[in-house]
Amino acid sequence: MTTKKTQDGSSSLNPGLLSSVFEQYTASGARAMHGGSLFELRTVDVQMPPCGVFVEPFVLTIQELSGAAETAAMERAAARIGVGGELAKTSMQAINGEPITLEKRDFIWEGVGMKGRRLVILAFGRAFDEMSIDETEAFLSSIPRP
C-alpha cells in the first residue's frame, strides 16, 4: 500500500495513486498498454511425471494469464470444472516445446488424468502467486469481519 508520511511522522494514504498509475499505463503515459497486457506475461516450464496417457515424463510450459484470459476462463468455469482448474488449464502453452493448440488443450487436460490435472493446478498456483504467507495474512487481517 502506498503511503505518505505527514510532518508528525504518521502515515496517510496517497490520494493521487490512481491518477499516477493511470497516467503511466494509458495511451498518454510512458508505459501505455497499446492493446496488450500491462506487463509481460511470465512463462514457467514444469517437469511433469508420467500421468494419464502420457507414459513418459514431459515438460509443460504454463503462462501467467492476462485479465481478459482470466475473465474468459472464469466464465467457462461456471459451467464446468471450477475456476482454479480452468485457469490452470488455460495456462498450458506447450509440451516439450511444441505449442498447445486450443484443439489439443481439452485432450491434454483429459489425457493427463486426475493426477496430472492436480499437478498442473498446483504448478499454476505456485508459479504465479506473488503473495507470501505473511502478505496474505496481513491482507486478510485488514478486512473487517461482521
Image (cartoon, rainbow, N blue to C red):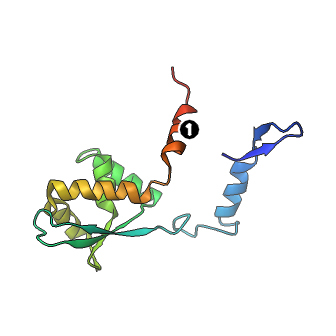
Q: Residue 88, how many percent across, how many down? A: 32, 57
Which residue sits furthest front?
Answer: 134
Q: Residue 145, how many percent across, how many down? A: 52, 23
In the image shown, does 111 or 137 lie closer to the viewer?
137
Name the residue rendered at 23%, 47% in the picture: 80
Name the residue rendered at 88%, 36% in the picture: 8
Which residue sits furthest bottom?
Answer: 97
Q: Residue 19, how many percent across, how many down? A: 72, 52
The residue under label 1 is: 138
Quadrant of the rendering where the N terminus is positioned: top right
Q: How many marks?
A: 1
Q: Is residue 129 above or below residue 48?
A: above
In the image shown, does 36 or 94 lie closer to the viewer?
94
Q: Quadrant of residue 42?
A: bottom left
36 left or right of 21 in image: left
Q: Secondary structure at mark 1?
A: helix
109 left or right of 135 in image: left
Q: Residue 16, how many percent across, how many down? A: 76, 48
Q: Is residue 12 above or below residue 130?
A: above
The amino acid on which the numbered mark 1 sits, given as a three-letter code, is Ala
| Mark 1: few/some/many CA within 10 Å (<14, 14-19, 20+) | few
Name the residue rendered at 11%, 62% in the picture: 52
Which residue sits furthest top?
Answer: 146
125 left or right of 51 in image: right
75 left or right of 13 in image: left
In the image shown, does 142 or 27 lie closer to the viewer?
142
Q: Quadrant of residue 10?
A: top right
Q: Quadrant of residue 108?
A: bottom left
Name the residue rendered at 70%, 47% in the picture: 2
